[in-house]
Image (cartoon, rainbow, N blue to C red):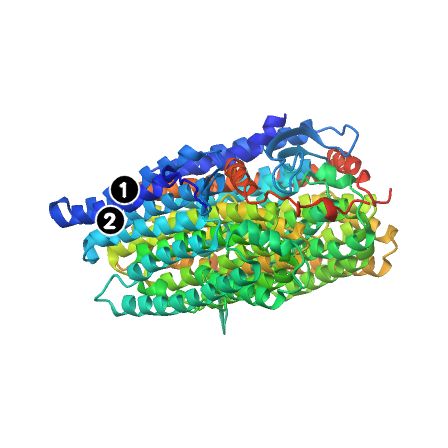
Amino acid sequence: MSTSLEWGLLAPEFLLAGWAAFIILIDLFWGGLGKERLGWLAAIGVVAAGGLSLIWVNDAKQFGELADINDYTTLFRVLFTGIGATICILSARYVRDRLLNPGEYYALILLAIVGANGMAAAHELLTAYISLELLSFSLYALTAYAKFDLRSNEGGLKYMLLGAFSSAIFLYGIGLIYGTTGSTQYAVIGEVLSGDTSDIEWGMYLGLALMIGGLGFKVAAVPFHMYTPDAYEGAPIPITALISALAKAAGFAFFLKLFAVAFLPLIDDWRYFIAGLSVATMALGNLVAIQQRNVKRLLAYSSIGQVGYLLLGIAALSQDAASALVLHMIGYVVTNLAAFTCVILYYNWTGKEEIEEYKGLAERAPYVALCLTIALFSLAGMPLFAGFATKFILFQAAADQDLLWLAAVAAFFSFVSLYYYLILIREMYLGEPEEKTRFQTPWLEYTALTVLIAGVFLIGLYPKPVFNVVEDATATIFVSEELESGEDLVGVP
Amino acid sequence: MEFVLLALIVIPLGVCPLFMLIPSQYPQLSRYLAALAGGALFALSLLVFVVYEFDGGSGLRYELQWDWMENIGFLRENGITFYLGVDGIGAPLVLLNGVVIFAAVFVSWNIANRTKDFFVLLFLLVAGVYGVFISQDLFFFFFWYEVAVLPMYLLIAVWGASSEFGTFTRTKEYGAMKLTLMLVGSSVLIWVAIFALFVEAGAGTFDMTVLREATLDEDFQKWVFPLFMVGFGVLAGMWPLHTWSPDGHVAAPTGVSMLHAGVLMKLGAFGILRIGMTLLPEGAEFWAPVLMALGVTGAVYGSVSALAQTDLKYMVGYSSVSHMGFVLMGLASMNEIGVNGAVLQMFAHGVMTALMFTSVGALYDQAHIRDMTQFGGIAKRMPRHSAFFAIAGLSSLGLPGLAGFVAEFHIFVGVFEAGYWWAGGLGILSAAITATYILRMLSRAYFGPLNEKWAGLKEMRIGEQFAAVILIAMILFMGLWPAPFIDRISETVEMIPGIMG
């Protein structure tokens, strides 16, 4: 089949990849630019790529048989480049003070975004898999980037070994699905699976299970989460933020599209399996977080808990639930980046990252303490902030799909999470600081923080505009509408 | 008028950023701003109460409905709306909130540590409380409910005080954490019940006026009502889930105790009435005996516990549990006079407990202890303070002419009318125990020979006196002329399905 490919559709990815090479060259030939400015330069390229992807708003194009360029892709391109740009800006000072080889560092971030974009765009398993690997390998390298720090090496190695293992499992799953359905195209798989599947059952179910396992690893669902705390703790903090935001969001962009297009016909078979994963993930993430003493590990476990809520959206899969899931994910990403910005700022000032070392932050940097408090309350699902509105919508969407019990479990663990966030808040506001001096204000980071907190408030107080965009995006992956919500569940006699 | 309602939410939220802009070296400026905002809220609340007139239907007036999200996802027409309105039950409670915040600002005048942060959180709390009283959309009802709980942890943990007992300490962090976790934990039940209610009603909207019309299956009502009852009940201090209340109120700074015991606990009872009984009348009818039993147990248990306290603030804390027990009894009677009494009691208890906390706080600020056995004859040194505390106490034990009598009388008539003789009898016993501990406290600490140790005590601050006078004015207003309250409340209560005329 000779379809002429419209290469222009991938312009943002080309720009990102080219910019990555450009950054390396700049670093090589113009070291005088300084490590800090290199980060800002990288951010400019990322923002440009994000802007470029806006060309395809309300458009629906296909890149050959490999990828869609539609609202779904555009939404995630913008989200991923937003994450990437934020991380580049937040990295600037950290890299200047603590890391070697800034060129490759930023280049890897850019390549990770390319991978993430591919995962959202792909509508074919192998493209998605290659994108996934591009993202993963960039993150493995970045996790181990602080090469004189043992924790970083340990985290990177664990992440890579387990990641490679899970990739193999995932690939085996792809093989089985291809073998049983005869295609790697999501849509074709969906068609085959909605027909009679009695003669391919075993291979199909095994393939599905293996794929869920592989994806579960990438998004850090229990019991595939083992690497997360170590990788989070070991990685340079901006990279921790990148993993928590980009890897999760990209993983779910892929997860959601794949399951909505290809595996929706089998929903009755995998729904309770995913629901079980969701419960396990929420429970373990939130309960183990209580015992953490290190802020990065705390946020690692809290992000595992958040994955549990997102999996709930998959278990309740329908367009409503998908929109709610993506909305919650956007809220989570913005909130989590805000929280990490505060952690990075504090680390840049003091080099400290234990919870008890946050004592008295409210005295020394009231604005950062306030923003971190807001972010943590948002993660705990308190109102005025993003977490409340998005969790409310997500859990209600699950309840609408007859999963009220799961929504109840999620609401309960959301409450549990408040406890460990309050512990950190208590340190900041009640602890006595060792010295009373104020910290210097780095304006650029403060601006980024302000923007993120404004986002937390916007989503918390008026999520409708974002929700509308999300709804348009998810509409593209639910063409068949066969599981349109509500109608058969209405209780009015 | 609808914009007055809007202002009740906008003013407290709007002053928060203003406080933040005030440089922290000018705490006085923050106090003036707080007084200004508190005064405005008091004036507007009074206006709402005075102007409110029943107008048929469910009694809802001054409605303001703005789209927030609709026709998206599982939401249909009017999915979630920013819907304000006040009815005859909301009006007195709005007034209560206005009175207590205005008084609380003056009581909190001397807060020196992070003054502006304190007022930011205090006004956030107030905004949440107003929001609950005037929201007619279930989503926003819950939204504001959580907003009201949000600032509590920091308010108590940063500005509160720990209590030393002989063998153990109740730290302020303990009180704050216990309060926050119990309240947020209980709201999980409310949350789940809201999810279930939305799905069951199938109207695709959180508009409570629509949900009220929806026909809900009786079995559904029976299993969901207890979720609301327990979820809201925790905030209402329902036995046996009241334990956060004494610890939290004692640990909190005076102004916060006033708002919390005075107003916030009413949100719980209000939620049972507004959501539970109004939307799920058959469920309420089924569970009413249980609610009655829990209410009367709380009333007796609270008063007996108060009797055992020597710490003045713990005594007030347990008396709140006891009085909220009366409120639950009134609700559980499921007849007009009893529910009227419950709402009256919410108001009456709100002002008198705020007055009690003001008095205890004023004494503690000077004496730094609260053990009533250590005092004696301090009425000679603090005559006004003693008079204020005595009035609050007498209202609390139900002296005719004061607010407490009107409310408790309605409740007991309602309870007997509904046929709960045992509960009515125990309730009256509880009121008698209340008289015992109040009078005993007055005689031990305030009257009798002056303990020379306390010869140096001075009268309470003028700001505190002002706060006390406003609160006493309300106690007398309701005690001597309850008609405006009863008119407003009863007509709305009549319209609640399942309430016997």
Q: Is residue A279 above or below residue A40?
A: below
Can the viewer see residue A9 in this picture? yes
Which of these two is toward me, B39 or A32? A32
Mark 2 falls within which chain?
Answer: A
Between marks 2 and 1 in the image, the one whose residue lies nearer the viewer: 2
Answer yes or no: are tags 2 and 1 on the same subunit.
Answer: yes
Mark 1 falls within which chain?
Answer: A
Q: Quadrant of the N terminus of chain B?
A: top right
The residue positioned 45% from the left and 66% from the top of the image is A225
Label 2 secondary element: helix
Q: Residues within 10 Å of mark 2 (few under 14, many from 20)?
A: many
Q: Position of residue A170 (x, y in %)?
A: 46, 64
Say what amino acid the circle numbered 1 marks: Leu
Tell me the tag on residue A92.
2
Nearer-N-terminus badge (2/1): 2
The residue positioned 59% from the left and 52% from the top of the image is A190
Q: Position of residue B231 (x, y in %)?
A: 66, 55
Q: Position of residue A127 (x, y in %)?
A: 42, 53
Answer whether labels 2 and 1 touch (C-beta < 8 Å): yes
Tell me the tag on residue A444.
1
Q: CA distance from mark 2 to mark 1?
A: 10 Å
Q: Position of residue A453 (x, y in %)?
A: 41, 43
Which of these two is toward me, B54 or A467? A467
